[in-house]
Amino acid sequence: MVELTHSLADQLAEALGETDPIPKLQLNLIVEHLGAEFAEALLAEVQQIEVNGGMITANGKRRRTPGGVYFYLARQRATADQRRLIFNASKKAGSRGTWSGATAPASTASTSNAAGIQLGRTSSAAE
C-alpha cells in the first residue's frame, strides 16, 4: 500500500510539475489521508480548470500554477483534522529533515507556496 501511495503521489507530482520535496510530501499525505480516488479526481478537476483558463489567486494578480490549484482545492475540501495531518506535517518535515519516507530540506527559509501555505522555517545551529 505504501509503495502504491508513493507511486500515485509521484505521478501526481509529475502531472502537476511539482519537483520540490515539500509539495511532493504533501501529495503523498493527500493520497494517504484523503485516498487515491480523491487524489485522482482532484487531478482531473485541475486539468479541466487549466483547459478553461486556470485559476487566479485571491488578490487577482496572477494565475495559480497547476500544483497551486491542486493544493488550494485539497485544502478547501479536507476537514480541519485532515488539513492538520497533511499540511502541518509537511511543516514539521521542513524542520526535521524527513517525514513518511519523503525527504525535505533540513534547513529551509520560511516561504509560502502558491496556495499561501507557510512552508519550512529557518533552522538554527542549536537544533
Image (cartoon, rainbow, N blue to C red):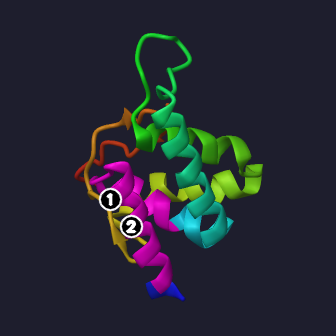
Residue 21 located within the stretch drawn in magenta: yes
Residue 108 percent coordinates (x, y) = 27, 46
Tell me how many marks there are: 2
Looking at the picture, which amino acid does disc 2 mark?
Gln
- Give whichever of 102, 78 is nearer the camera: 78
Residue 100 located within the stretch drawn in magenta: no
Which residue was labeled with disc 2? 11
Asked if marks 2 and 1 touch (Cβ < 8 Å), the reply is yes
In this view, 2 is above or below 55: below
Which residue was labeled with disc 1? 14
Q: Is residue 40 left or right of residue 107?
A: right
Q: Quadrant of residue 85?
A: bottom right
- Residue at (77% x, 51% y) in the render: 79
Q: Is residue 75 left or right of residue 44?
A: right
Residue 37 percent coordinates (x, y) = 65, 68
Q: Say what secondary structure mark 2 lies in.
A: helix
Residue 80 percent coordinates (x, y) = 75, 49
Q: CA distance from mark 2 to mark 1?
A: 5 Å
- Give whichever of 62, 85 is nearer the camera: 62
From the image, give the main secondary structure of the stretch colored magenta. Answer: helix
